[in-house]
Amino acid sequence: MSDKYIKFEIVTPERVVLKEEVRQVTVPTKAGEITVLPDHIPLVSSLMPGVIYLKKRNGEDEIMSVSGGFLEVLKNKVVILADTAERAEEIDMDRVEEARRRAVELKEKARRGENVNFVEINAAIERELARTKAIKRWRKIKNIK
């Protein structure tokens, strides 16, 4: 394996979610999912709600959900400025399911013509789907049922 690493940092308005050296980063961009390896060309992209996969320096996998934001790739450095982001082990599946259920209910109200913000509802649903994918993937890797 290569002895080169990427300095990775993901930040939200509330906190630094993760800051460490990694072997690779896979992120959901508006142009599609991309994987960044050491010596990747410089890049700036906007992110879609989805799952971020990291291969840590020690070979372990790290999984996070992200609701959107921006990605900047510099020489062996990746910085993500995220609207929201959570490490998979921080996600409470019961809260995710409740939030998704509320978002779906609001979407149904919008379909019936009630006064709700459809854009915000869809964003909430996408965010909860990303959180669900992240926790399921993390549980699978860790063999947690």
Image (cartoon, grey):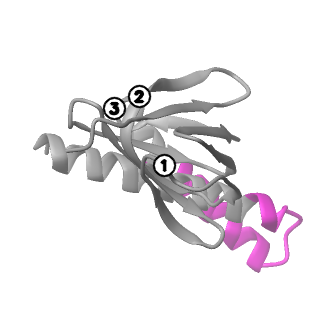
Q: Disc 2 designates what residue?
A: 21
Q: Of 65 and 54, which appears nearest the observer?
A: 54
Secondary-structure class at tag 2 = strand
Q: Residue at x 59, y 61 (%)?
A: 126
Verify CB contact (< 8 Å) between mark 1 and mark 3. Answer: no
Q: Of the residues under marks 1 and 3, which one precedes in the sequence? A: 1
Where does the N terminus fall, quadrant-wise? top left
Whole-percent x and y of residue 106?
70, 62
Quarter of the image where one finds residue 31: bottom right
- Residue at mark 2 to residue at mark 1: CA–CA distance: 14 Å
Residue 107 in the figure: left or right of residue 88: right
Alpha-carbon neighbours of circle 2 within 10 Å: few (<14), some, or many (≥20)?
A: many
Q: Of the residues under marks 3 and 2, which one precedes in the sequence? A: 2
- Marks 2 and 1: which is nearer the front? 1
Magenta span includes 118: yes
Whole-percent x and y of residue 83?
70, 41
Numbered marks: total = 3
Q: Disc 1 designates what residue?
A: 39
Q: Residue at x 29, y 31 (%)?
A: 57
Q: Residue at x 62, y 50 (%)?
A: 67
- Marks 1 and 3: which is nearer the front? 1
- Residue at mark 1 to residue at mark 3: CA–CA distance: 29 Å
Label of residue 89 in the image: 3
